[in-house]
Image: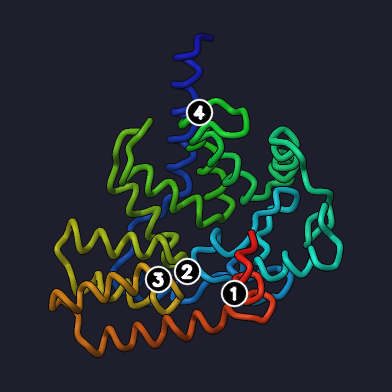
């Protein structure tokens, strides 16, 4: 089989999988009444506190167990002498890209959706020695989405909507991925839907409603979007005040002495 034929086969497989995981478009009422709370995986598995958004900025990814450990718990683990092992599962820290991939593959074999999502992101960019392969990334993201990973739905939505790189742009399919993630509590997907309403549909009122929800979840760019809308006269002073209060409350809930110490020394 030629390389072109293999790529075409991979694209067909990804398309078939995508068709099996996408539900019908939801109504506005369903979309706006669901997904107001962050899922459990937005909390650190050690201290159980929610991690400030974006999670990747305030936590470290552990390839051995596919967990995001907050900087506070990671620093505390380091201070207790656990410098060469995962703070969560205590596995030795991998020393090379090949070792990271081997650990991730074990989690793939165990049907861990986060592992599918992780390896897909590597194929998208061609990292860790893997050649860039967008059809393969889509196939893995689609499997992750089938297993319930909301980040995978978000990434597929962005790929079909914003990028179109390696795939035929499909706004309808993109919106359905984003809607599915949003109604299950994925803040980035809901923020993107708000941007879609503002930029493409001219529905400023609905955009603000989306961003009010994600500001309450602690997404700073949603707060900024509402601030801009207030300045432009498309959001009320009361809406901005409510969003600011809710955002600050969400941010306070992510704080701990350990995290504040990690922040002070810029722990990574």
The answer for how far apart the CA atoms under marks 4 and 2 are is 30 Å
> SS of the residue at dot 4?
loop
Disc 3 marks which residue?
A: 220
Of the residues tagged 2 and 1, which is closer to the observer? 1
Q: Position of residue 230 (x, y in %)?
A: 20, 79
The answer for how far apart the CA atoms under marks 2 and 3 are is 16 Å
> SS of the residue at dot 1?
loop
**Which of these two is toward me, 80 or 16?**
80
> SS of the residue at dot 2?
loop
Tell me what residue is drawn at x 71 percent, y 75 percent: 47
- Estimate how packed mark 3 is, as few (under 14), some (14 to 19) or many (20 or more) residues with alpha carbons within 10 Å: some
Count of number-bearing discs = 4
Tell me what residue is drawn at x 28 percent, y 76 percent: 209
The answer for how far apart the CA atoms under marks 1 and 3 are is 15 Å
The reply to whether dot 3 and dot 4 touch (C-beta < 8 Å) is: no
The reply to whether dot 2 and dot 3 touch (C-beta < 8 Å) is: no
Disc 4 marks which residue?
A: 132
Q: Which mark is residue 50?
A: 1
Q: Which mark is residue 93?
A: none
**Which of these two is toward me, 82 or 68?**
82
Disc 2 marks which residue?
A: 185
The reply to whether dot 1 and dot 3 touch (C-beta < 8 Å) is: no
């Amino acid at each position: 089989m030629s390389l072109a034929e293999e790529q075409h086969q991979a694209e067909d497989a990804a398309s078939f999988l995508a068709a099996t995981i996408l539900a019908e478009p939801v109504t506005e009422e369903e979309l706006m009444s669901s997904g107001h709370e962050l899922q459990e995986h937005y909390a650190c598995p050690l201290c159980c506190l929610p991690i400030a958004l974006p999670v990747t900025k305030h936590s470290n990814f552990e390839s051995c167990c596919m967990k995001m450990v907050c900087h506070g718990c990671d620093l505390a683990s380091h201070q207790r002498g656990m410098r060469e092992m995962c703070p969560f599962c205590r596995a030795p820290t991998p020393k090379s890209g090949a070792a990271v991939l081997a650990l991730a593959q074990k989690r793939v074999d165990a049907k861990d959706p986060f592992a599918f999502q992780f390896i897909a992101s590597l194929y998208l960019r061609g990292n860790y020695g893997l050649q860039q392969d967008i059809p393969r990334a889509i196939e893995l993201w689609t499997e992750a989405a089938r297993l319930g990973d909301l980040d995978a739905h978000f990434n597929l939505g962005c790929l079909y909507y914003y990028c179109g790189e390696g795939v035929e742009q499909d706004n309808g399919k993109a919106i359905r991925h984003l809607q599915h993630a949003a109604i299950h509590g994925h803040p980035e997907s809901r923020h993107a839907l708000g941007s879609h309403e503002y930029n493409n549909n001219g529905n400023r009122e609905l955009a603000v409603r989306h961003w009010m929800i994600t500001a309450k979840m602690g997404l700073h760019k949603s707060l900024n979007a509402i601030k801009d809308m207030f300045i432009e006269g498309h959001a009320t002073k009361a809406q901005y005040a409510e969003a600011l209060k809710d955002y600050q409350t969400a941010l306070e809930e992510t704080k701990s002495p350990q995290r504040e110490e990690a922040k002070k020394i810029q722990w990574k």
